[in-house]
Image: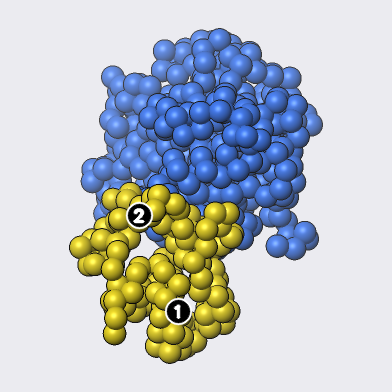
Chain colours: A blue, B yellow
Amino acid sequence: MMTNDPYFIDFPGRIKSIQREMAADGVDVYLGSRLRTLSWTTDAFCPWRTYIVIPAQGLPTVFTFVIDAARVADESWLDFDHVLGFAPMGGQDQITAVSDLIKSYLKDGKGVVGVEAGMSNYLPEGNLTHYEYEAFAAAMPGAKLVNALDIVDRLSMIKDEGTINRFRKAGLMADAGHEAVLKAIKNGGFAKFTETEIAGIAAMAMREAGSTWEWSFTGGNEIASGYRTGLMGGACTPPTDRKLQAGEPLMVDLHSTYRLGLGDHTHNYLLAPATERQQWHAKNFVDLVALCLKTYKPGITPSTLADEMMVFCEERGFAEFMVPGFEHGIGMLGDEWRIGRNDGPFPYWTNPDHVYQKGEMLICAIQYACPEENIGFRYENAILITEDGCETMSKFPLAIEVIE
Amino acid sequence: MPTIKYLSPEWTAEAEKRLRSQLTPDQMKNLTSSMLTVYNNCPDGKDRALYYKLENGVFTDISIREVPFPEAEFVISGDYETFAKISRAELGSRSALMGGKLRLQGNMVKALSLASIVDRFNKILSEIECEY
């Protein structure tokens, strides 16, 4: 990869930065297993169980399910000798293969091995399982296993230019999906489609724009219509075969992927005819999103931002419809859960007092739901915290249009 | 042909002769690699290894080694008795590997691409009449 590539990421540099932190933390070998760690270190999509073994010096070695090892090696910056397959064979099962390599890095088999443990609301997080932990401990009796995931979390918090550019590109791909959906539903077109078909129309347009996957584990593109938009607290809406209907809201939450950078943008519509009450809800929401985007900047925290937004909601009389949270984490593929590091009052959840800094990325995520009236809206957009505000990755204009 | 003892110098010489004459570099895909088959718990209680070295599809070294064994790109290890069962066709080599009776060290992806080659020369070796 040429360094004049706007999407260039210095992966060998990332490994060296992990190795410096390992030395500072007294970790001899790092055993990464989380999807976010694998994306951040290998530049390859690792959908099967995968481990990365990072020694104190030199190149890391990736172990993945043998059926996918050649493809991962082909896509990664690492060569074929550093992306190995594991399989259920003597000496080649993941515990034996990985622990044999780790032991080769430890003097007399003794030392500290940093692992990734914990919990997540995100199912494919990839923390070491209890079984894996015990099996690795038994296979490396001279090693002390310690939880070291904070090393990758603190290093990956501030985004480099290549990562940001990948997110910018993915954001524009999501916009292409929105444009295709708008074209399909306007002038009464919506009546022909189901939620799944809307998801597919967006997917086709995003793929044509170069997106490689509707990445979210929550069902790809999340489309909701009618009462499903207003499910209380419902920020997860895999599409169904429900037909779009006149007089109902439509929520279009699109997920695009560009070189492990993620697009995530939700746009909402009212399918005509729209009542005054529906338009009141819509205006509340659009005004809130605009205020929220104006508020994001270095120095604020999730809790101060939420307090400020909820005051606005209260003043306007719609606080009861709000989920009082305005963000979720984002990073290279696999990193879509908590914000920042594991340093909050509840382990492995976002720290409400995390202070945003320039260069961080997150999803500005806002959920509005009024189940009694079968209406709700969602806003999501990847944002970059800048010097004095934020930059949105998706540029699709903020509005809730009434689609005739 | 008189029966020879498995892994003896006579057996090794016969193995070398057959492999060289029956496998062309083309059939060996012009492979350059090395492989060590480690036999643990031989009848005399020792561990031994059969070392193969290939350059551009030509066997340049086939020899029985004792500890310390040389480095090799692939190492297959197991009990002498397991290998003897495989040679007597009482046990399949894949089944031994999948069942954990044999242990493979080396790049699994490369090993997959070489499996048919290894099968080829294992078949030739299994045809050597010998006693265990």
Query: Residue drawn 48% across and 55% down?
Result: B105
Tag 1 subunit: B
Q: Is residue A184 above or below residue A352?
A: below
Q: Is residue A260 left or right of residue A130?
A: right
Q: Is residue A326 above or below residue A9?
A: above
Q: Is residue A149 above or below residue A397?
A: above
Q: Mark 1: which amino acid?
A: Ala
Q: Is residue B126 left or right of residue B107?
A: left
Question: Could you tell me if residue A195 is visible in this image?
Answer: yes
Residue A274 occupies quadrant: top left
Question: Could you tell me if residue A392 is visible in this image?
Answer: no
**Which x, y percent locates residue A278?**
38, 28
Q: Are marks 2 and 1 in contact (CB under 8 Å)?
A: no
Count of marks, rendered view: 2
Query: Which residue has dot 1 on it?
Result: B13
**Which x, y percent locates residue A35?**
50, 40
Query: Which residue has dot 2 on it?
Result: B43
Disc 2 crowd rating (10 Å Cα; few below 14, some 14-19, many 20+) is: few
Query: Residue drawn 45% across and 53% down?
Result: B47
**Which mark is first along the chain, 1 or 2?**
1
Q: Nearer the viewer, residue A361 or A195?
A: A361
Query: Residue drawn 28% across and 50% down?
Result: B99
